[in-house]
Amino acid sequence: MKSSGLYFYVLISVLALSCRPEALPPVETGQPVFSFSGGGVDITAGEEDFYLFTDYQKDASNVYSFIARFAKTSDCATDCEEELVIEIRDVQQTFGFGTVDIDNALHVGSYDYTIANPPVSNNLVIVDFTAEPEGTGPFIYSWTTHFNNSIDTFTTSNPAYSRTFDTNLNISFANVCLAIQNNFDCEMEYCNTIFLQNNNAGCKADFQVFNSPASVMTLEADTTGGVPPFTYNWSNGATTSSITQPHNGGVDQTFCLTITDGTGCSDEICKAIKIVQGTVTPQVCASRFQYEKSFSSDNPDSLQLKTVLIRYVDPGDQEFRSDLLPQSNTDFFTITEVGDYELNENGDKTKKLKISGSCRLYHENGNSIDLPFEGVIAVAYP
């Protein structure tokens, strides 16, 4: 009888173990710890059967990703119902024995968003401008640069301007204007197109003013850069490289010259000219500048360290991702607090993170979700 009883006990034990449900994180009691809220996506671990699963992965490039996943099951291969995944890609480590410097990898600060197809290469160009106004100083300088949809302003005489651009895009130039003003009613502006590619120097219009005793002045075009042949268009209608004009002694006269080179590059400069009767040297007021470009080319961070991917599967089983298209300049992801937390269900160490940010999640059919958010998550690490 003892033997059959032991057999019955063992049989019941085996059956009980074979029916054990999948391993899930321990159910928390009391106030929920982990949550994500914003943009219509509101998930709290411990409510409505949601769990927070923590994990980490290492890819072929030895880059670690630290993962927080809100879901109702540990395996989403068949039916996710609703799922939110936050994947922080933050360190490459090729040494050590299965551990990472987690305090260096995950820390308070801002993160960019991961891009599914990053650009092949970027060029960084630094343009050093030098104002060369004509007239009597001191001058007040007002620079304005337009690059793509970005506008920058400077007020120094010699600003340094830097821009990174994708060599695969056609947007590789900046429109730059310099307005000057002095205490003698001189207010002039000069604009030029700065080609950021090092194989295109652009074109630059200028002209020199020469006076003669016969109350006549000569204006001669002085072109820099560009590709011949050049065409000239003066504000008085002339189309030659130089013009002769009578001057009204002591009265400002403004002349403009537009040059166009053989590639279609065009540039214009205007000058206010005053010649005092009985003097030889003309008084000229004009805004001009010179610039020098320096370049450095690099492949962008193909590893995309310190970036974040957010993926959301809605209750209708539609997947939206943050990495299908670049995020706007106003979108952000910030870790505001980092702290140690308990071991997860697999015995891995975890970190508790407080996060905030905003992004747009895209579906492959073109639909999108705007997602301003804040939350508390945890991620595992080795």
Image (cartoon, helix red, strand yellow):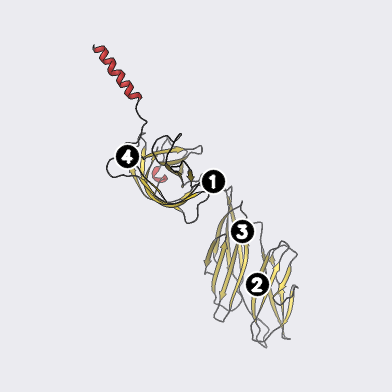
Residue type at numbered disc 4: Glu
| CA neighbours of label 3 inside 10 A, class few (<14), some (14 to 19), many (20+) | many
Q: Is residue 4 above or below residue 338?
A: above
Marks 4 and 2, how far apart in space?
69 Å
Q: Secondary structure at mark 2?
A: strand
In which quadrant will I find the C terminus?
top left
Quarter assignment of residue 262: bottom right
Residue type at numbered disc 2: Ile
Camera-near label (3 vs 4) is: 4
Q: Is residue 360 above or below residue 235?
A: above
Q: Which residue is mark 2?
A: 269
Q: Are marks 4 and 2 in contact (CB under 8 Å)?
A: no
Residue type at numbered disc 3: Leu
Q: Which residue is mark 4?
A: 342
Instruction: Please report the residue visible at 74 percent of the width from the left and 66 percent of the height from the top.
Output: 230
Q: Are marks 2 and 1 in contact (CB under 8 Å)?
A: no
Query: On the rendered structure, is 110 left or right of 180?
Result: left
Residue 311: percent from the left, percent from the top? 46, 44
Q: Which residue is mark 3?
A: 196
Residue type at numbered disc 1: Asn
Q: Are marks 3 and 2 in contact (CB under 8 Å)?
A: no
Residue 164: percent from the left, percent from the top? 56, 55
Q: Which residue is mark 1?
A: 365
Residue 94: percent from the left, percent from the top? 47, 38
Let me know if residue 109 appears in the view. no
Precedes in sequence: disc 1 or disc 4: 4
Let me know if residue 169 appears in the view. yes
Camera-near label (1 vs 4) is: 1
| CA neighbours of label 2 inside 10 A, class few (<14), some (14 to 19), many (20+) | many
Instruction: Please report the residue visible at 65 percent of the width from the left and 72 percent of the height from the top.
Output: 269
